[in-house]
Image (spheres, rainbow, N blue to C red):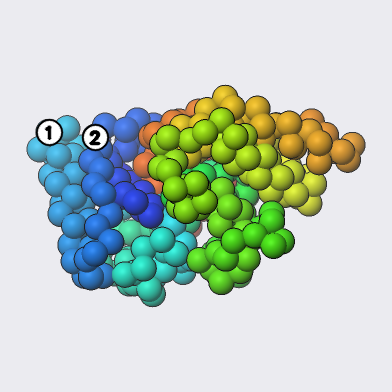
Amino acid sequence: MDVAIGIDIGGTKFSVGVVDRQGQLLDRETIAVNHSLSAEDLFADLGHVVRRQISRASDHHKCTPVVVGVGSAGPITHNVASVSPLNIRAWVDFQLQHKLIEVSGLPVFGDGDAKALALGEGWLGAAKGCNNFMAMVVSTGVGGGIVLNGELLSGATGNAGHVGHIVVEPNGRRCSCGGQGCLEAEASGLAIEAITGRSPTEPTYEIMQRTGRLVGQAAASICNFLDLELVVVGGGVALGFGATFFASAQEKMDELCRLDFSRKARIIPVALGSEGGLIGAAAVGWRGLNRQIDGRDVPAGPAP
Protein backbone atom coordinates (compact mmCIF):
# COMPACT_ATOMS: atom_id res chain seq x y z
CA MET A 1 0.00 0.00 0.00
CA ASP A 2 1.29 3.45 -0.93
CA VAL A 3 1.46 6.07 1.82
CA ALA A 4 2.39 9.72 2.20
CA ILE A 5 4.74 11.15 4.80
CA GLY A 6 2.97 14.20 6.22
CA ILE A 7 4.95 16.96 7.94
CA ASP A 8 3.28 19.67 10.03
CA ILE A 9 5.61 22.56 10.90
CA GLY A 10 4.49 24.91 13.66
CA GLY A 11 6.17 27.47 15.84
CA THR A 12 6.61 25.15 18.83
CA LYS A 13 6.62 21.65 17.39
CA PHE A 14 7.31 19.49 14.34
CA SER A 15 4.99 16.54 13.67
CA VAL A 16 5.62 13.81 11.10
CA GLY A 17 3.22 11.01 10.26
CA VAL A 18 2.30 8.23 7.84
CA VAL A 19 -1.04 8.69 6.01
CA ASP A 20 -2.67 6.42 3.47
CA ARG A 21 -4.77 7.44 0.45
CA GLN A 22 -7.97 7.18 2.49
CA GLY A 23 -6.65 9.73 4.98
CA GLN A 24 -5.98 7.28 7.78
CA LEU A 25 -3.12 8.32 10.05
CA LEU A 26 -1.12 5.14 10.63
CA ASP A 27 1.81 6.50 12.63
CA ARG A 28 3.12 9.79 13.99
CA GLU A 29 5.91 11.40 15.98
CA THR A 30 6.15 14.91 17.40
CA ILE A 31 9.16 16.82 18.69
CA ALA A 32 9.54 20.28 20.19
CA VAL A 33 11.17 23.05 18.17
CA ASN A 34 14.46 23.93 19.85
CA HIS A 35 14.73 27.66 19.18
CA SER A 36 18.33 27.77 20.41
CA LEU A 37 19.56 25.73 17.44
CA SER A 38 20.95 26.97 14.15
CA ALA A 39 18.93 26.55 10.96
CA GLU A 40 20.86 23.42 9.92
CA ASP A 41 20.72 21.79 13.37
CA LEU A 42 17.01 22.49 13.60
CA PHE A 43 16.48 20.76 10.28
CA ALA A 44 18.69 17.87 11.43
CA ASP A 45 16.17 17.29 14.25
CA LEU A 46 13.33 17.23 11.73
CA GLY A 47 15.29 15.03 9.32
CA HIS A 48 15.83 12.36 11.98
CA VAL A 49 12.08 12.13 12.58
CA VAL A 50 11.33 11.99 8.85
CA ARG A 51 13.76 9.10 8.41
CA ARG A 52 12.26 7.26 11.39
CA GLN A 53 8.72 7.62 10.02
CA ILE A 54 9.81 6.40 6.59
CA SER A 55 11.36 3.36 8.28
CA ARG A 56 8.22 2.82 10.38
CA ALA A 57 6.09 2.95 7.24
CA SER A 58 8.16 0.26 5.51
CA ASP A 59 9.24 -1.98 8.39
CA HIS A 60 6.31 -1.81 10.79
CA HIS A 61 3.33 -1.02 8.56
CA LYS A 62 4.62 -2.81 5.42
CA CYS A 63 3.76 0.23 3.28
CA THR A 64 5.62 2.10 0.56
CA PRO A 65 6.18 5.84 1.08
CA VAL A 66 5.75 7.57 -2.30
CA VAL A 67 5.46 11.28 -1.48
CA VAL A 68 6.11 13.87 1.22
CA GLY A 69 3.48 16.51 1.95
CA VAL A 70 4.23 19.56 4.08
CA GLY A 71 2.09 22.10 5.86
CA SER A 72 4.29 24.90 7.18
CA ALA A 73 3.81 28.09 9.10
CA GLY A 74 4.65 30.96 6.80
CA PRO A 75 5.43 32.97 4.87
CA ILE A 76 6.46 30.33 2.35
CA THR A 77 7.25 30.11 -1.36
CA HIS A 78 5.71 27.66 -3.83
CA ASN A 79 5.88 24.03 -2.61
CA VAL A 80 7.90 25.20 0.42
CA ALA A 81 10.95 25.73 -1.80
CA SER A 82 11.80 28.17 0.97
CA VAL A 83 10.10 28.95 4.28
CA SER A 84 10.39 31.87 6.70
CA PRO A 85 8.07 31.03 9.63
CA LEU A 86 7.64 34.14 11.73
CA ASN A 87 7.87 32.08 14.91
CA ILE A 88 11.00 30.11 13.89
CA ARG A 89 13.63 32.83 13.71
CA ALA A 90 16.43 30.48 12.60
CA TRP A 91 14.60 29.69 9.36
CA VAL A 92 14.66 32.71 7.08
CA ASP A 93 14.41 31.78 3.39
CA PHE A 94 15.29 28.25 4.48
CA GLN A 95 15.43 25.86 1.50
CA LEU A 96 13.07 23.29 2.99
CA GLN A 97 11.91 21.43 -0.11
CA HIS A 98 15.44 20.66 -1.31
CA LYS A 99 16.50 19.52 2.17
CA LEU A 100 13.50 17.19 2.49
CA ILE A 101 14.12 15.68 -0.96
CA GLU A 102 17.69 14.91 0.14
CA VAL A 103 16.53 13.29 3.39
CA SER A 104 13.59 11.32 2.01
CA GLY A 105 14.48 10.56 -1.62
CA LEU A 106 10.82 11.31 -2.43
CA PRO A 107 8.96 14.07 -4.29
CA VAL A 108 8.04 16.87 -1.87
CA PHE A 109 4.98 19.14 -2.15
CA GLY A 110 4.12 21.80 0.40
CA ASP A 111 1.78 24.61 1.33
CA GLY A 112 0.91 26.80 4.29
CA ASP A 113 -0.15 24.93 7.43
CA ALA A 114 -3.64 26.43 7.54
CA LYS A 115 -4.09 25.89 3.79
CA ALA A 116 -3.13 22.26 4.34
CA LEU A 117 -5.68 22.09 7.15
CA ALA A 118 -8.31 23.46 4.76
CA LEU A 119 -7.54 20.61 2.35
CA GLY A 120 -7.82 18.04 5.13
CA GLU A 121 -11.05 19.42 6.58
CA GLY A 122 -12.58 19.72 3.10
CA TRP A 123 -11.54 16.15 2.33
CA LEU A 124 -12.55 14.31 5.49
CA GLY A 125 -13.45 16.83 8.19
CA ALA A 126 -15.94 19.46 9.28
CA ALA A 127 -16.02 21.18 5.85
CA LYS A 128 -16.62 18.02 3.81
CA GLY A 129 -19.13 18.87 1.08
CA CYS A 130 -18.75 22.63 1.61
CA ASN A 131 -17.37 24.61 -1.33
CA ASN A 132 -16.93 27.99 0.39
CA PHE A 133 -15.20 28.03 3.74
CA MET A 134 -12.14 29.11 5.68
CA ALA A 135 -9.95 26.97 7.90
CA MET A 136 -8.02 28.67 10.69
CA VAL A 137 -5.20 27.60 12.97
CA VAL A 138 -5.13 29.44 16.31
CA SER A 139 -2.04 28.18 18.05
CA THR A 140 1.47 29.58 18.57
CA GLY A 141 0.58 31.80 15.59
CA VAL A 142 -2.62 32.34 13.63
CA GLY A 143 -3.06 31.23 10.01
CA GLY A 144 -5.83 30.67 7.52
CA GLY A 145 -6.70 28.85 4.33
CA ILE A 146 -9.67 29.80 2.14
CA VAL A 147 -11.61 27.56 -0.23
CA LEU A 148 -13.78 29.49 -2.67
CA ASN A 149 -16.03 27.70 -5.17
CA GLY A 150 -14.21 24.46 -4.34
CA GLU A 151 -10.73 25.86 -5.03
CA LEU A 152 -8.06 26.55 -2.43
CA LEU A 153 -6.92 30.15 -2.90
CA SER A 154 -3.17 30.54 -3.36
CA GLY A 155 -2.51 34.16 -4.30
CA ALA A 156 0.47 35.60 -6.15
CA THR A 157 3.09 33.93 -3.95
CA GLY A 158 1.09 31.06 -2.43
CA ASN A 159 0.39 32.93 0.82
CA ALA A 160 -3.31 33.76 0.45
CA GLY A 161 -5.35 33.37 3.63
CA HIS A 162 -3.02 34.93 6.21
CA VAL A 163 -5.94 35.93 8.42
CA GLY A 164 -3.54 36.27 11.35
CA HIS A 165 -2.45 39.59 9.89
CA ILE A 166 -5.87 41.20 9.70
CA VAL A 167 -5.84 44.17 12.07
CA VAL A 168 -8.31 43.66 14.92
CA GLU A 169 -6.92 46.24 17.40
CA PRO A 170 -5.73 49.36 15.50
CA ASN A 171 -3.75 50.60 18.51
CA GLY A 172 -2.76 47.13 19.62
CA ARG A 173 0.48 45.24 20.09
CA ARG A 174 3.33 45.21 17.59
CA CYS A 175 3.23 42.03 15.47
CA SER A 176 6.16 39.90 14.40
CA CYS A 177 5.24 40.78 10.79
CA GLY A 178 6.04 44.44 11.52
CA GLY A 179 2.43 45.57 11.68
CA GLN A 180 0.41 46.61 14.71
CA GLY A 181 -2.75 45.14 16.19
CA CYS A 182 -2.82 42.02 13.99
CA LEU A 183 -4.94 39.09 15.12
CA GLU A 184 -1.75 37.07 15.64
CA ALA A 185 -0.35 39.82 17.90
CA GLU A 186 -3.49 39.75 20.03
CA ALA A 187 -4.87 36.20 20.01
CA SER A 188 -2.04 33.73 19.35
CA GLY A 189 -0.51 31.56 22.05
CA LEU A 190 2.61 33.73 22.12
CA ALA A 191 0.53 36.90 22.38
CA ILE A 192 -1.62 35.53 25.19
CA GLU A 193 1.48 34.61 27.18
CA ALA A 194 3.00 38.06 26.59
CA ILE A 195 -0.22 39.86 27.55
CA THR A 196 -1.09 37.80 30.63
CA GLY A 197 2.24 36.45 31.82
CA ARG A 198 0.59 33.02 31.87
CA SER A 199 0.82 30.02 29.58
CA PRO A 200 -2.10 29.75 27.14
CA THR A 201 -2.68 26.32 28.68
CA GLU A 202 -3.79 28.13 31.87
CA PRO A 203 -6.16 30.80 30.56
CA THR A 204 -8.63 32.86 32.53
CA TYR A 205 -12.27 32.84 31.46
CA GLU A 206 -11.89 36.44 30.27
CA ILE A 207 -8.93 35.56 28.04
CA MET A 208 -10.85 32.66 26.47
CA GLN A 209 -13.73 35.02 25.75
CA ARG A 210 -11.50 37.81 24.42
CA THR A 211 -9.59 35.44 22.14
CA GLY A 212 -12.84 34.04 20.77
CA ARG A 213 -14.23 37.51 20.12
CA LEU A 214 -11.12 38.63 18.26
CA VAL A 215 -11.07 35.50 16.10
CA GLY A 216 -14.79 35.92 15.44
CA GLN A 217 -14.19 39.53 14.41
CA ALA A 218 -11.56 38.56 11.85
CA ALA A 219 -13.63 35.60 10.61
CA ALA A 220 -16.69 37.82 10.17
CA SER A 221 -14.69 40.23 8.00
CA ILE A 222 -13.63 37.39 5.71
CA CYS A 223 -17.15 35.92 5.54
CA ASN A 224 -18.61 39.32 4.64
CA PHE A 225 -15.90 39.94 2.07
CA LEU A 226 -15.86 36.54 0.34
CA ASP A 227 -19.40 35.23 0.91
CA LEU A 228 -18.30 32.26 3.01
CA GLU A 229 -20.73 30.09 4.93
CA LEU A 230 -18.39 28.28 7.30
CA VAL A 231 -15.21 28.78 9.32
CA VAL A 232 -13.53 25.73 10.87
CA VAL A 233 -10.91 26.36 13.53
CA GLY A 234 -8.16 24.17 14.92
CA GLY A 235 -4.90 24.70 16.79
CA GLY A 236 -3.93 24.23 20.41
CA VAL A 237 -5.28 27.57 21.63
CA ALA A 238 -8.71 27.35 19.99
CA LEU A 239 -9.29 23.69 20.80
CA GLY A 240 -7.83 24.09 24.29
CA PHE A 241 -10.18 27.01 25.07
CA GLY A 242 -13.07 24.91 23.82
CA ALA A 243 -16.73 25.87 24.16
CA THR A 244 -16.06 29.27 25.73
CA PHE A 245 -13.88 30.29 22.78
CA PHE A 246 -16.32 29.06 20.13
CA ALA A 247 -19.39 30.57 21.81
CA SER A 248 -17.66 33.97 22.02
CA ALA A 249 -16.47 33.72 18.41
CA GLN A 250 -19.96 32.83 17.14
CA GLU A 251 -21.51 35.64 19.16
CA LYS A 252 -19.12 38.14 17.57
CA MET A 253 -19.81 36.74 14.09
CA ASP A 254 -23.54 37.01 14.67
CA GLU A 255 -23.02 40.64 15.66
CA LEU A 256 -20.93 41.52 12.61
CA CYS A 257 -22.30 39.26 9.84
CA ARG A 258 -25.46 41.26 9.12
CA LEU A 259 -25.66 40.98 5.35
CA ASP A 260 -28.32 38.68 3.93
CA PHE A 261 -25.71 36.28 2.52
CA SER A 262 -23.48 36.18 5.61
CA ARG A 263 -25.85 36.27 8.56
CA LYS A 264 -25.94 32.46 8.84
CA ALA A 265 -22.15 31.99 8.78
CA ARG A 266 -20.93 29.53 11.41
CA ILE A 267 -17.65 29.03 13.21
CA ILE A 268 -17.00 25.51 14.52
CA PRO A 269 -14.11 23.29 15.67
CA VAL A 270 -12.24 21.19 13.15
CA ALA A 271 -13.42 17.59 13.01
CA LEU A 272 -9.97 16.02 12.55
CA GLY A 273 -8.70 17.31 15.89
CA SER A 274 -5.01 16.89 16.58
CA GLU A 275 -4.65 14.75 13.43
CA GLY A 276 -5.77 17.55 11.12
CA GLY A 277 -2.34 19.06 10.51
CA LEU A 278 -0.81 15.77 9.42
CA ILE A 279 -3.81 14.65 7.36
CA GLY A 280 -3.85 18.06 5.70
CA ALA A 281 -0.11 17.89 4.98
CA ALA A 282 -0.59 14.45 3.45
CA ALA A 283 -3.47 15.83 1.36
CA VAL A 284 -1.05 18.43 -0.04
CA GLY A 285 1.31 15.58 -0.94
CA TRP A 286 -1.35 13.40 -2.57
CA ARG A 287 -2.69 16.37 -4.55
CA GLY A 288 0.77 17.27 -5.79
CA LEU A 289 1.58 13.67 -6.73
CA ASN A 290 -1.70 13.26 -8.61
CA ARG A 291 -1.02 16.38 -10.62
CA GLN A 292 2.56 15.32 -11.34
CA ILE A 293 1.55 11.86 -12.50
CA ASP A 294 -1.32 12.62 -14.85
CA GLY A 295 -1.57 16.38 -15.13
CA ARG A 296 -5.09 16.51 -13.75
CA ASP A 297 -6.20 19.79 -12.17
CA VAL A 298 -7.36 18.14 -8.95
CA PRO A 299 -9.90 20.26 -7.03
CA ALA A 300 -8.47 21.80 -3.89
CA GLY A 301 -11.42 21.59 -1.53
CA PRO A 302 -12.50 17.94 -1.68
CA ALA A 303 -10.43 14.77 -1.58
CA PRO A 304 -6.97 15.09 -3.10
Q: Residue 299's x, y, as percent?
A: 57, 47
Q: Residue 237's x, y, as percent?
A: 48, 39
Q: Which kind of residue does numbered mark 2 sit on?
A: Asp
Residue 286 in view, yes or no: no
Q: Earlier in the sequence, mark 1 or mark 2?
A: 2
| Residue 60 badge | 1
Q: Residues within 10 Å of mark 1 (few under 14, many from 20)?
A: few
In this view, the residue farthest toward the bottom is 93
SS class, disc 2: strand
Q: Nearer the viewer, mark 1 or mark 2?
A: 2
Given contact means CB atoms under 8 Å apart, are the residues at marks 1 and 2 in contact? yes
Q: Is residue 297 above or below residue 214?
A: below
In this view, the residue farthest toward the right is 260
Viewer-closest of 260 and 243 = 243
Determine whether, in the image, residue 41 is placed left or right of residue 134.
left
Instruction: Give the residue displayed 44% in from the left and 64% down from the top.
Output: 86
| Residue 27 badge | 2
Instruction: Give the residue displayed 24% in from the left and 34% down from the top.
Output: 27
Q: Which kind of residue does numbered mark 1 sit on?
A: His
Viewer-closest of 97 and 36 = 36
Q: Residue 47's x, y, as percent?
A: 19, 57
Q: Quadrant of residue 205?
A: top right
SS class, disc 1: helix
